[in-house]
Image: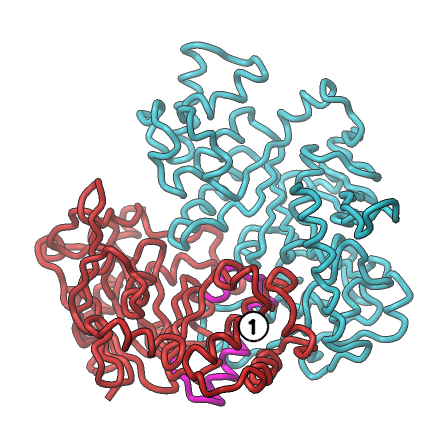
Chain colours: A red, B cyan
Amino acid sequence: MALLEVRDLRVSFDTPDGVVRAVRGVSFEVDAGRTLAIVGESGSGKSVSTQTITGLTRGAKISGEAVFDGIDLLTADKAVLRELRGSRIAMIFQDALSALHPYYKVGWQIVEMIRAHDKSVSKDSARERAVELLRLVGIPNPEKRVDEYPHQFSGGMRQRAMIAMAMANDPVLLVADEPTTALDVTVQAQVLSVMAKLQEEFGTAIILITHDLGVVAQVADDVAVMYAGAVMEKAPRRELFYRPHHPYTEGLLNSLPAQGGGDMRLTPIPGAPPSLIGLGEGCPFAPRCPYAFDKCWAETPPLREVFGTDEHHSACWLPVDEEGRVQARRELESSREETA
Amino acid sequence: MSTEPLIKVRDARKLFPVKSGKLFGGQQDYVHAVDGVDLDVRPGETLGLVGETGCGKSTLARCITRLYDLTSGTIEFDGQDISTLSRKEMRPVRREIQMIFQDPYGSLNPRRRVGSIIGDPFAIHNIVSGRERRVRVQELMERVGLNPEHYNRFPAEFSGGQRQRIGVARALALRPKVLVCDEPVSALDVSIQAQVLNLLIDLQDDFGLTYVFISHDLSVVRHVSDRIAVMYLGKIVETAPSEMLFELPRHPYTRALLSALPVADPDLADSRERVVLAGDIPSPVHPPSGCRFHTRCPRAQEDCVQIVPPTEPVLGDPPEHATACLHPLAAGEQLAGNRPTISDTELDDTSLDDLSRGKEASGS
């Protein structure tokens, strides 16, 4: 059984403009020791999904279930949730500066994290553990750094300090929401390698939320692609990159500048993502999809098994067998050539 | 392509004063944002400028457009030194050099209508007015892929990608020769990013524009640029034609930067060399002596601490591929195996303390 199993998660917010259906029936699972990357563009619902699971969405209407180790996180008692968060489920966020308290020393915040969940740990041994954690994530001179304030850390060090804090109670699940987005590439490489090292050492499961397909290709085991509040495609990493089924995934990959030059003009996805207010029946991607046909507008495609493997799922009405899918692409390409 | 550069930057320096640590007296400190840069931009080309946060790439861009005045050095545009021109003398030059900014939200006045934002350059330079101006603006809107009927809308009614198109239309209004694009697509989602990049590429073909294209995203820069200059801590460490830079990076920093770039290809991501640099970028208030990269460089030797490396082609490289390194990488040589010899991670102890102090000072 999976460590975390999310089933048909739905989240909506009442706003003055109408009901925003931010997450519309999302299902995924994460196994121990593996990394699930959730990719999507702004407003795809990737952050809202995971924030809901960790109990961080306020004023939302929520349905579905998220079973973590036998406990449904969505209906669990607040006290139970509080006990889980920060100990067995930890989170790191994009903006480390606002996630760390500016008035308290970094070490103090880690000590607090440890002692909040286990009062029997003495302050001194919690402090020792804080130093050890900072060393683990590659903070130089941790004995001294432990007594510094967040503003004295550089951006990359803050992010690593936040990872240290998240790892303080040996979590089995780490939810990382765009952990490297605000960082430069060389610092990003440092942070990603720290996360990989920790996962190897402790067998932590990671949910990595990102919009960067390059990061996904580097660290994910499994990938879920989200669009307009729903999962469009779910597959192991290599499957997704080398044999995408959903036209949105295909479109995203085509939008990227090719490695090694190639064609000067890129192939963007035309149009813009839909509004999440009053989204009706039909595939949400249909208005931007070059393959769209009548059925796509009428019926919302469910997440179906494709290419004959139970690991690869796609929410698309195109043929599920490889031959049919390739045929569809060929037809699209030849019709494009005709119009060109 | 003509060899005579359109923009010629020579020994450009831009220092920003910061408050010193002491209450009274003490020595005045400076952030060395741009510190001795030579750069040529040739007509019709796209010059990519890459580097990490704080390397001075945006400052350099703002110096080229004269939004900042240089502390010393010269910038020649079309044979004329524009670095010391007065505001009035600068006016006709401004028509030729326009800029596109990163933030499509902050760079457009939210209280003004799109039509008047795009029409501003016409008004400021007193070119066309009234009905004629409206026609010109609508032509521009159409050219950048906006609906001309949206002339009377406010920026808030547009998405991020559309706003960036508004910024492009405004920059194009005066038919400039040069567009300086400072992270023009960094705030956009990938699918939208590709739309704007395509637009920029098309406009360059149509109007024969010259681009200075700044980004921290190397794959975007590689895609659009003819040549790329890599900056580190206020200096250019390597300049080369795009493909050459990616195939044979000579400077260890360039190599590290390229290896850290995430590629959306699992097999490539698994197989390639990855260099994880130790530590952080040192403070630009007291930049390291000699080669500025020596504190983090896996190949650094004793001489790197003393000698400022000249920018010149490595033996066998064509003249357009210049590297500022005393111990450049040979073809096929691995960098990851090298360990830092001069220093270890201790050095970043002082890293950004000075910088954050500087920020506080400028904020107060």
The question of residue A189 being in magenta is answered with: yes
| Image coords of residue B222 (percent x, y) | 57, 57
Q: Is residue B155 above or below residue B338?
A: above
Q: Is residue A37 above or below residue A3?
A: above
Picture quadrant of residue B11? top right
Q: Which residues are magenta?
A: A179-205
Side of B222 where B22 appears, left or right: right
Look at 61% across and 67% down and name the residue there: A186
The residue carrying mark 1 is: A108
Instruction: Give the total number of marks visible in the rendering.
Output: 1
| Image coords of residue B264 (percent x, y) | 45, 68
Observer-nearest residue: A312 or B332?
A312
Q: Is residue A264 above or below residue B12?
A: below
Q: Is residue B169 above or below residue B220?
A: above
Side of B121 where B353 appears, left or right: right
Amino acid carrying label 1: it is Trp
The question of residue A153 being in magenta is answered with: no
**Chain label for disc 1:** A
